[in-house]
Image: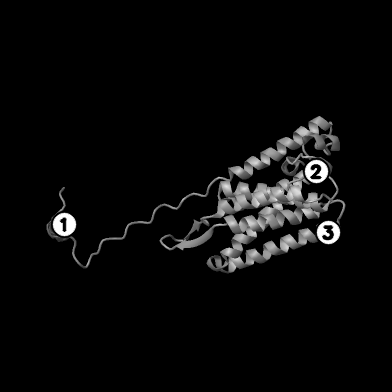
Amino acid sequence: MTRPPDESDDIEAFLRRAEREFGLRPDLPEEPPPPPPRPAPPRPFVTQSLLWAIGIVYVLSCVLSGSFFQPAFPVLAVLGAKINERIADGELWRLLTAVFLHANLIHIFFNGYALSVLGPETERFYGHGRFLALYLISGLGGSIASYALSPAPAVGASGAIFGLIGGLGVFYYLNRRVLGEFGQNQVRGIVAIALINLLIGFAAQGVIDNWGHLGGLLSGIVIGVALAPRLTVDLRFFPPLFIRRFPMQGWLWVFAIALVMIVLVRLVTPA
């Protein structure tokens, strides 16, 4: 069977021939090009690497101590705990190695959990290299504050994690107008978290190195101001896409801050 000729087919054929010869009709504008594909969020491999690093170091300290729940202090001292007398004698590397050591299973559990929660979000906003700089320099700043104000030996990533809190708070504060009510709520929430943890630390003096926490927090805020991205909105997407723009001289400020920290260690008298 054959289909009888349809008048609409003739009209469509005529319109296609007319468009080939004369172009599109003025009442049929060209469709705008589709927006580029939305990029996938990057994998937080720096956060994952840091978690693996502190986990491996903890297992090593446990194996050398013969105890899984609480590594022996002499082992922690050999591996790089913050000990003021040895730092004053020139072992400055302890200011950073102490960030990767933990005193017991509960200590590493809470620090590891905090890093797994805060790390991916902060790394996604800052990017891999800037996130690593924020973490390490905050940890260094926390160790320096502890060195200057606390005579007790110390270990732990808490100073670096407080630095992530500070850096994340700076990011939301700088972009609070672009992020609207969500950004403002995040700033208030992060301030509350920081204050609650600092109050807990001061209430448990002798157990928690609160000066290290405070030093890490302040370092994170300063590094955050230097490195935190500033957001703009690309309305070609739905929902809109946030575009990151970083300060042009951010890395220069980071190097200057790190240099000041190193000089401070030489000038400060340990507690």
* Nearer to us: label 1 or label 2: 2
Which of pointers 1 and 2 lies earlier in the amino acid sequence?
A: 1
Residue 231, image x and y in percent? 51, 61
Helix, strand or loop for disc 1: helix
Residue at disc 2, secondary structure:
helix
Quarter of the image for residue 46 reads: top right
Q: CA distance from mark 3 to mark 1?
A: 79 Å
Q: Is residue 72 visible?
A: no
> Could you give the CA–CA distance between mark 1 and mark 2, rounded to whole angstroms?
85 Å
Q: Which mark is residue 16?
A: 1
Residue type of the residue flagged with mark 2: Ala
Q: Which residue is mark 2?
A: 88
Q: Amino acid at mark 3?
A: Phe
Q: Position of residue 62 (x, y in %)?
A: 80, 34
* The furthest residue to the front: 267
Along the viewing direction, whichever of 204 and 7 lies nearer the viewer: 204
Residue bearing mark 3 = 202
Which of the numbered marks, if any, corresponds to residue 167?
none
Outermost residue, right side? 206
Q: In percent of the image, x 63 and y 57: which residue is there?
A: 168
Per the model, the C-alpha gap separating discs 3 and 2 is 26 Å
Rendered image coloring scheme: one colour
Looking at the image, tell me whether mark 3 or mark 1 is earlier in sequence order: 1
Label 3: how many residues lie within 10 Å, few (<14), some (14-19) or many (20+)?
A: some
Type of residue at label 1?
A: Arg
Q: Secondary structure at mark 3?
A: helix
